[in-house]
Amino acid sequence: MNIAIRVDASAAIGTGHLVRCRTLGRALRQQGATVRFICRAHPGHGIYALREEGFAVTALPPAETSKTESAGEDYARWLGVPQARDADETIAALEGRPDWLVVDHYGLDADWERRLRPHVGRLFAIDDLANRDHHCDALLDQNYNPNAEARYAARLPAEATRLLGPRYALLGPEYGQNRSEGTAHSGRIDRLLVFFGGTDPDNLSGRALEALRHPAFANVTIDVVVGPNNPHREALAKQAATRPGLILHAPRPHLADLMAAADLAIGAGGATTWERCFLGLPSLVVSIAENQRPACRALAAQGLIAYAGHHDQVTVERLQAALSVLVAEPERLRRMAEAGRELVDGQGVERIVGALLSKGSS
């Protein structure tokens, strides 16, 4: 079976979309599928890492800088070119008619999908915004939302397969290898992980490290992972140099081992949420994009995470206060860890691959 995956990463977009598509691509390849990525060569595109893993990648021409820099959450600008042009360039990059085209991009919608449909067997969209129509055969939204079905009721063709919720979370095999069955959280915080994604433009990592200067955390070992597009690397290195027990990590292929070793994580509300839940790692979460707010609030209401708020409201003092509360509530940490493990069973990739391979081509 031939699979094409249209996904981008960049300094504005981040790396989360590419990471989850890479996880899916690996699993499909292990089942004998031929997988090709199609990515636009934005700054911070991540294409070389895909090629190093042996994936075929077609790099679409880079967009004009003015169209992608400082784009915030203007998803159309994230694409960098008009949808019609992107569709034409994607069609040219397909190299035949793939059985499935996977598309994971907030800047693409039903108009783009209609242009691609005559050139592919089936179309699989990955989304978590539910803010635009899709013309696809199947859709994945791995986010936690009590109203998941209703959000897409008017957005998809009636016959489209819906794969909704954390039971479809795209976790790499490293996470299963690092999950210790039956091991309960101790309620203590001796080691802590800080990671705010591949970009972290607001330097939330730096704010977290300032908060952790409080004497209550003096004996806590801190792992900080600096993403590949993080512009604050030097400032973080200076902070690390003045704090014993703080380990600064370069970009890594996965965080499974660091998550398994940690007792608490401080991070963003994106795809790493499901990795932390699966490993039973309690977390203090900051939403770094508008679309993360609903899931963060819903997860906090169910006791699955501690939610510090949106990135533009989270100060050093606010983080410090939230951390002090968690340190004083070991039973809450234990409940959070267990609830996360119950929510995410780690079989999401297998379910998605099974759904794709069983449908075949049309």
Image (cartoon, helix red, strand yellow):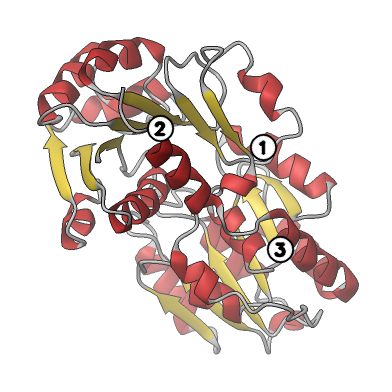
Q: Residue under circle 3?
A: 341
Mark 1 or 3, closer to the camera: 3
Q: Residue under circle 2?
A: 359
Q: Position of residue 65 (x, y in %)?
A: 21, 31
Q: Circle 3 sits in a helix, a strand or a loop, which is it?
A: helix
Few, some or many C-alpha atoms within 10 Å of disc 3 (few <14, some 14-19, many ≥20)?
many
Q: Circle 1 sits in a helix, a strand or a loop, which is it?
A: helix
Q: Position of residue 243 (x, y in %)?
A: 54, 84
Q: Which mark is residue 195?
A: none
- Any part of residue 298 in sight: yes
Position of 121 with respect to 105 (left or right) is: left
- Any part of residue 287 in sight: no
Q: Position of residue 261 (x, y in %)?
A: 59, 81
In this rendering, is residue 153 above or below 271? above
N-terminal label among 1 and 3: 1
- Disc 3 marks a residue whose amino acid type is Arg
The image quadrant that residue 311 belongs to is: top right
Between the C-alphas of marks 2 and 1, the distance is 34 Å
Q: Circle 2 sits in a helix, a strand or a loop, which is it?
A: helix
In this rendering, is residue 79 above or below 262? above
Residue ID at (31%, 15%): 112
Q: Residue under circle 1?
A: 293
The number of callouts visible is 3
